[in-house]
Amino acid sequence: MSLRIGVLGASRIAEQAIVGPARELGYRLVVVAARDPDRARAFADTYGVERVGGCYGDVIDDAEVDVVYNPLANALHAPWNLEAIKAGKPVLTEKPFARNHDEAREVAEAAEIAGVSVLEGFHYLFHPVNRRIFELATDGTVGDLRHVEVRMAMPPPAADDPRWSLDLAGGALMDLGCYGLHVMRQLGAQSLGRPAITAAHASQRSPGIDEWCDVELRFPTGATGCSANTMVGKAFSFTITVVGTKGDAVAHNFIKPHGDDRITIRTPRETWVEQLGMRPSYSYQLEAFAAHVLDGAALPIGVQDAVQNMHYIDAAYRAAGMSPR
């Protein structure tokens, strides 16, 4: 059975996150809408979307739409996810789930009451590269885990990019750090216990907007974690490093394994490289979401996971001396 997808906005991420995976899997992009009608028409023409809606509400209300994809600016995630929930439409929403913990909880409660699925788009979680790095962190290959480091860097976005806007809930921790905190929480759930934030440091580009933010954590086992995030880097770089008593392992590009699917493992006796496949993580994600919507297959995370991640984001901002969005 095919899946019919409605797209909110004509965002840059949509080509990777929904257009490519939908083509690969044979799903239909039935309607798109954007604030700028010309952008919506150009998006539809470029990517083969069947029609253009006059507003976001047209996408949600379209009778042919089975699921809604929401890649809008951060501040618009929760409001439009709530609209989709009211219409009974499952949502694949870009991260972060909301502007803050309270807003995330409101969406989660609405979704649970309505029985509507909302998946926060932590696509990395679905790729074999990241399943393997989690396994290496916990199966004894590198010994007992002592440290986890997630480093995310990107060159500065344009000055008018929404990621620099406080009103649109931008900032390095929101855009990048949400991944690092999610990684820490996933490892905690597997074997290390719930991590605690011990410190955070940030530099503000403008009042309330962090251009970089580093978060330090500690697990009940004594292992430490660091989520380091910058939107003023020299180049794109997205790594996970796990360090244990017997060695370490590095996922070289955990966000875009379709560009680099290597994991390098080092122990005192040997060093080796595993390559886990260059199929995009977004394809795995959409495949899993479709299986859930169409066949009831279980997902690895749900709305309460999203609420908890926003709790950590808010706590990290406070630890850095800043206010949550």
Image (cartoon, rainbow, N blue to C red):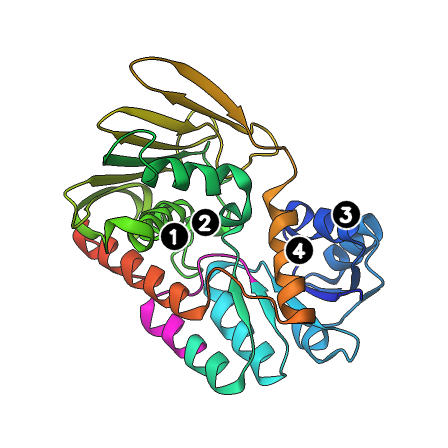
Q: Mark 4 points at which residue?
A: 287
- Label 1 CA crowd tier, 10 Å (few <14, some 14–19, many 20+): many
Compared with 168, 89 (above or below) is below
Looking at the rendered structure, the secondary structure element under dot 1 is helix
In the image, 259 versus 211, the foreground residue is 259
Which label is found at residue 24? 3
Which label is found at residue 163? 2
The quadrant of the rendering that contains the N terminus is bottom right
The reply to whether residue 8 is visible in this rendering is no
- Residue type, label 1: Met
Q: Earlier in the sequence, mark 2 or mark 4?
A: 2
Q: Earlier in the sequence, mark 4 or mark 3?
A: 3
- Residue type, label 4: Glu
Please identify, in this view, whether the residue under mark 1 or under mark 4 is nearer the observer: 4
Q: Is residue 27 left or right of residue 266?
A: right
The reply to whether dot 2 and dot 3 touch (C-beta < 8 Å) is no
Q: Earlier in the sequence, mark 1 or mark 4?
A: 1
- Label 4 CA crowd tier, 10 Å (few <14, some 14–19, many 20+): some
